[in-house]
Image (cartoon, rainbow, N blue to C red):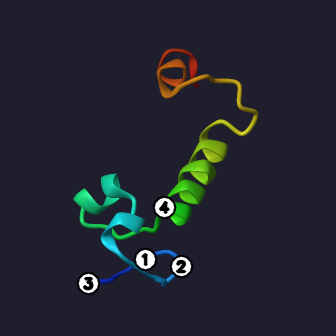
Amino acid sequence: MKKYICNECGGEFSKNQLDSELLIDGESFCKDCASSLMEAGRDSVDPDHNFDSYEDWDENGR
């Protein structure tokens, strides 16, 4: 079975243990690292969690 290396943590994972959306873009991130990176991105864009979605940010963001 082919193993993939997570670009974030360096661990070896099977294809079903990787974030499928990022894998399509050619990036290999395990599901835990992908989730952590997404949360960090959300916190960076909206640290106070005032917006329900990115659509709110587009309409009301500054």
User: From mark 3 to mark 4, how far is it between C-alphas?
Assistant: 18 Å
Circle 3 sits in a helix, a strand or a loop, which is it? loop
User: From mark 4 to mark 2, how far is it between C-alphas?
Assistant: 11 Å
Q: What is the three-letter code of the residue carrying label 3?
A: Met
Mark closest to the chain's N terminus, 4 or 2: 2
Q: Please tell me whether mark 2 or mark 3 is closer to you in this view.
A: 3
Q: Please tell me whether mark 4 or mark 2 is closer to you in this view.
A: 4
- Say whether marks 3 and 4 touch (CB < 8 Å): no
Circle 4 sits in a helix, a strand or a loop, which is it? helix
- Say whether marks 2 and 1 touch (CB < 8 Å): yes
Circle 2 sits in a helix, a strand or a loop, which is it? loop
Mark closest to the chain's N terminus, 4 or 1: 1
Few, some or many residues within 10 Å of mark 4 (<14, 14–19, 20+): some
The residue identified by callout 4 is: 31
The residue identified by callout 2 is: 9
Mark closest to the chain's N terminus, 1 or 3: 3
Q: Position of residue 51 (x, y in %)?
A: 63, 23
Q: Position of residue 34 (x, y in %)?
A: 49, 59
Circle 1 sits in a helix, a strand or a loop, which is it? loop
Q: What is the three-letter code of the residue carrying label 1?
A: Cys
Q: Position of residue 11 (x, y in %)?
A: 49, 83
* Nearest to the observer: residue 7 or residue 18: 18
The residue identified by callout 3 is: 1
The residue identified by callout 1 is: 6
Mark closest to the chain's N terminus, 2 or 3: 3
What residue is rendered at 25% in x and 59% in y?
A: 25
Q: Quadrant of the C terminus?
A: top right
Q: What is the three-letter code of the residue carrying label 2?
A: Cys
